[in-house]
Amino acid sequence: MALTKDQSLEAYRLMKVIRRFEEKCAELYAAGDIGGFLHLYIGQEAIAAAAKYALREDDNIITAYRDHGVALARELPTNQVMAEMFGKSTGVSKGKGGSMHLANKSKRFWGGWAIVGGHLPLAAGLALADQYRGDDRVTLALMGDGSTNIGYFHEALNMAAVWKLPVVWLVENNQYGMGTAVTRASAVSDITRKAEAYGMPCCMQVDGMDLVATYEMIKEAAEYARSGQGSFFLEVVTYRYRGHSMGDPERYRSAHEVEEKKADDPIIRWAAYLKENKIATAKKLAALDQEAEDEVMAAIEFAQNSPFPEPEALYENVYA
C-alpha cells in the first residue's frame, strides 16, 4: 500500500471535509450568503488528496478557479477558506479574492486563477525561479481539460520542454471541456497527444476516482521532474457531479448519467477499500464523517461572525 494507515485515514477525512465544504457552499450560494462565481470540486476530491501525499510541503501548487478542494488539501485553514467564500476580512485573501482566488504564500499555494489556462505560464515561471536558484522543488500545475485548447497551454508547455522545467502538468479531465471527452478507459486522448508533441513524458489516462493510482502517478511524475530531467504530463480522468458553476443549467448531460457516475464516487471507493483491508471499521468512518461535518460547520460560524473588510482596505497593496 502506497499510503500509511494514518495517511489513509487522513485522506478519507480530508475528502469528506472537501465534499461537505462544497455541499455547504452550494447551499450558502443559493441562500445569497456567497456571491460572485462558485465552481465546485464535488467528485474530484481524490486528486487533491493524492497531491497532498505525493508532494513535499515546500513544492509549489497552482490551479485554476475550481480551487477550494486543492486549497483545503494544501492545509489552508478551513475557517479562513470559508471566510473567503463570504468575502470576509479573515479570509485567506482578506475577502478580496473570493471563491476563485484562494492563495497562501506560506503554504506555497499560488492560487486560484480565473482566466482559463492563464495560470500555466505562471507555473512555468515558478519552476524557472526554482531551477535558477538551484532549489529542487517541483511545481504542480492543475488545470481543467478545457485549458488544453488555450494558447497559454501550448506556450507554457513549449517553454517547459525547451528549458526542462520541473513542472508536473496535471489535467483534471472531468470530460466536459470542448473536444476532450473520454471514449474508453486507458485511451490516449487528444489531450495526451498534445503534450506528447512537446516531447515530455506522458502517462496513459489515470483513473482520478482511484486515490492510490492517482497518488502513485503524481509521485512518479514529481520524482522525474525533481531529478532534473524536465516536465512530466498527467491526464487524470475524473467526473464532477455538479455543473461547471452554480449558474450552469447542465443541458449537455442527463441526470441519469450523473447518477450513474456516482456509483464510482472516489469517497465511496476509498471507504470500501479501508473496510475491506481492515484499515477502518464502519464506526471509525462514521466518526471521521462527523469530524468533517463539525469542522465545516465551525468554519461557517467563523465566517458568519467575521467582519467585512473596511473601505480603507481597497487601498492596500496599491503602489504609485
Image: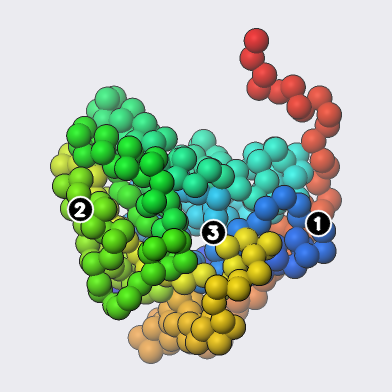
Report the front residue among 111 and 273: 111
Could you tell whether 316 is left or right of 127 in the image? right
Q: Quadrant of the C terminus?
A: top right
x then y, percent, for residue 37 = 67, 53
Work out whether 187 lies above or below 203: below
What residue lies at 21% left-to-right and 39% top-to-bottom? 161
Q: Is residue 228 left or right of residue 302?
A: left
Query: Please, which residue is most extreme toward the top here?
Result: 320
Residue picked out by circle 1: 33
Q: Quadrant of residue 112?
A: top right
Q: Mark 3 sits on what residue?
A: 69
Mark 2–mark 3 contact, CB under 8 Å?
A: no
Q: Please give the name of the residue rendered at 64% of the width and 14% of the height, measured from the top-left corner.
A: 319
Number of the front mark, 3 or 1: 1
Hey, what amino acid is under mark 2? Answer: Glu
Mark 2 neighbour density, 10 Å: few (under 14) some (14–19) many (20 or more): some
Res 209 visible: yes
Q: Read off the residue under disc 2.
A: 196
Residue 28 x, y percent position in the rendering: 77, 63
Q: Residue at x 45, y 76 (%)?
A: 266
> Picture coordinates of residue 125 (x, y %)?
36, 31
Mark 3 → mark 1, Cα distance in angstroms = 20 Å
Residue 149 drawn above or below residue 178: above
Mark 3 neighbour density, 10 Å: few (under 14) some (14–19) many (20 or more): many
Callout 3: SS: helix
Q: For marks 1 and 2, give the CA distance.
A: 44 Å
The reply to whether dot 3 and dot 1 touch (C-beta < 8 Å) is no
